Amino acid sequence: MLTETDWSTITLTLHLASIVTVLLLIIGIPVAWWLARTTSAFKGIVSALVALPLILPPTVIGFYLLLLLGPNGPVGQFMQWLGLGLLPFTFEGLVVASLFYSLPFVVQPIQNAFESIGSRPLEVAATLRATPWERFFYVALPLAKSGILTAAVLGFAHTVGEFGIVLMIGGNIPEETKVISLQIYDHVEALDYTQAHYLAGIMMLFSFIVLFALYSLPKNRPIRYGA
Amino acid sequence: MHNNAAPNSFKVQFELLLSNSVFSIDLDLPNKGVIGIFGESGSGKTTLLRVISGLQSIDNGLIQINNAIWQNNAFHLPIHKRSIGYIFQEASLFPHLNVEKNLAFSQKRAWVNKQSADSTLNQTEIYRLLNIEPLLKKWPHHLSGGERQRVAIARALMINPSVLLMDEPLSALDYFRKQEILSYLDKLKKELQIPILYVSHSSRELARLADYLVVLEKGKVRAQGEINQVLTQTDLPHYLQKDAGVIVSACVIEKDSQWSLQKVSFGDNSDSAELWVHDNDTKLGDYLRVQILAKDISIVLSKPIDSSINNILLSSIVSIQKDNQNMMQIQLRVGKNTLFSTITQRSAKHLQLEVGMKVWAQIKSVALIA
Amino acid sequence: MNQFKLLTLIILTCLSISPSQAHADNALVAVASNFTLTMKKLVTQFHEETPHTLRVSFASSGKFYAQIKNGAPFDLFLSADQLIPTKLLSEGYAVPNTQATYAIGKLALWSSDPNKVDPMGNILKSKTFNKLALANPKLAPYGFAAIETLEKLNLMESTKPLWIQGENIGQTYQFVRTGNADIGFVALSQIQNHQELSTGSMWEVPNDLYSPIKQDLIVLKHGENNAAVQAFLNYLALPKTQKLIQSYGYHTEFN
């Protein structure tokens, strides 16, 4: 049913999505925390930058990332100067591109979760001798748990489903940057619709299960006080 | 500059501009007992507590409790390093922790006692005082408003604070919950040796609990002092006029079960005054908090024999002053106790009252407030 | 570019491969999407017959152009046109004298309905179709060829209101295949397998109605001296390979 190549794209995709999700949370949580709490004038600029990938078409983002990260782009030249090599057409490049593209899907649910906590529980914790770090880890994070879970699922699912950017930045190279969506594209281009249907079916089923699980989760305890 | 402050004192001085309101506070507070903070909404009550706790930062000023300086012009101690217990208007229990874990959050971080061992309460006493045991395994959203507030108070106490800050802790509760918590607060007050700043816009709550009263008006201190001193000053703000009078602690000395009355005695043992009040299930020897309002005392020159009023005390006039409402405030002495009566200027003139005169004080009602 | 150049190239290549270089090598090949099906078949056979390994990446020629300019590690590029290999060469990303035509596309008017398109293509004049799909002439050589055909037949004005344009020839094929457009100009390679029409009905557009759709390959700088690339170029020149490419609906210059 599935060929060896199909399986390798599935493994590669899951590998990519897992790494990207972990990194997205590591980056997204502090960004969301800052956005939720700051009164800085830069809040608007940062919010807009984070949300940008929602608006630009993936191939357009892919094209500009390619220019930016390529050997003639500023980031590419900096990477070469550091002796780290270039990102496009490598697995690491896919990770970087997916991070950028999926960031709003991770930042926004977490930011909403942090904002809905309000300042009171953190103030209470402060009066109970909790240091700023303790307030974050023992109060803010547990209270934002469902938002963080939503963000992780969305970030993962979104990375799995990405096409335009990974085609542009990854180059559709077997075993390195060829993810499920690209494999489906190849099957379609090769007029091999049966294989395409299998893979697309698996993706649909996967996405459905993930989203169904997400939306079936018990809603977080209402964060309300008082009588 | 403030180094000469007495070690056992509680000073709060600051100026603050906050969303177009100016706060200019200078308070010299006792370092134990209940300090009532009274004022209409927007007068700065909550801001005062937030500044003391550090939740509201100020650029300069002085916050000093005993020997500890929390804020001066050069130094700002972060919130989590101030030894406070803060009880918010709504019981802000952590919704992700059950009652036991909410309390453990505080207990884990409790201040190791810095002063005498009896200045604070241990866990057993707190659980007993606030009846916490039955609630331990419950989640905050399964508690009633009163239960939540009890847990919040217990949690604030368990941090072992040197100041307790209570911001209208009863305002979110219905009448019966209020009574429930008030009775816990009465007990608490007797056992705690730390200052309790109690913010309220209810003069009744403050009459019941406060020993010391601060009246705030538009961000400034309008009056501060012992509660009886504040409530008997002649320039009392109009919104406190109805509360003018004295609050005394009285001992139950006699029960009259036939009429459901009890006799209480207050003041100096050798020269006490006695009042009949309704019986409220106390025992002989119990102490009651009794409020005698100035508007409830009328003055007669000869002892009436055909009055419905039970409490008619022989007293002498100590002073006669006109208050800011153009009423006459008569200070009376009963034995060694002081009472106040507010009467119209016409009555004072008509009775030809003078300092030193012996008159009868007819006390129309006596409120047992705790 | 003509067959002599390709032959010269192959001869030169054969000569240049010394026994020590003949060991199994790896190459990464960028292939225009419209050649996907044929390429997969070619690669399977190539792997059976030689020790070399090819990894093939499929995308549109325009994407490959952007990627190659930005450092993509491709060794060989099979474009859907002649323009992009020429540009890559002039910009210094390709090895000189390696550009060659590997296939010439044939245009067909096709419908997924077996009774729709008559063998003379008269349906274009009859207007008994809801839509006419064609590839964007600015982006896709097959689209340009479709426009040339319609101009030659003087059917531009009459059919224009019924056009729907695909971004590439693959999308155009899908419009017709899914029945959203009754007929469309597609590549013969998309609908023909082993000289048989896989499904529907078609009119193979005569060669004189459009200029040849030449698809060129070029060796990229990254693949200079790659034994697998050279071996694959040799393999492409074999008569049986040419036949195979023809059976997928292309014309080759070796006949």
Image (cartoon, grey):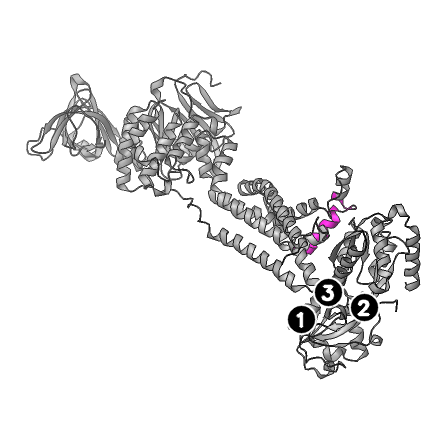
Residue B367, horizontal then vertical, whole percent: 20, 33
Report x, y in % for residue A10.
63, 51
Label 2 – label 1 distance at C-alpha: 22 Å
Label number found at residue A207: none
Left or right, B304 with reference to A119: left
Q: Secondary structure at mark 3?
A: loop
> Which chain does the residue under circle 2 lie in?
C
The answer to whether B43 appears left or right of C192 in the picture is left
**Residue under numbered circle 2:** C246
Q: Quadrant of residue A189?
A: bottom right
User: Which amino acid type is marked by label 3?
Assistant: Asn
| The N terminus of chain C sits in image quarter | bottom right
- Looking at marks 3 and 1 on the same chain, the residue that comes earlier in the sequence is marked by 3
**Contact (Cβ within 8 Å) of mark 3 with mark 2:** no
Which numbered disc, 3 or 2, marks the residue that appears first in the sequence?
3
Characterize the magenta stretch by its predominant secondary structure. Answer: helix
Badge 1 element:
helix
Residue C44 horizontal/vertical position (percent): 76, 58
Task: Name the subunit of mark 3.
Answer: C
Q: Disc number at residue C168? A: 3
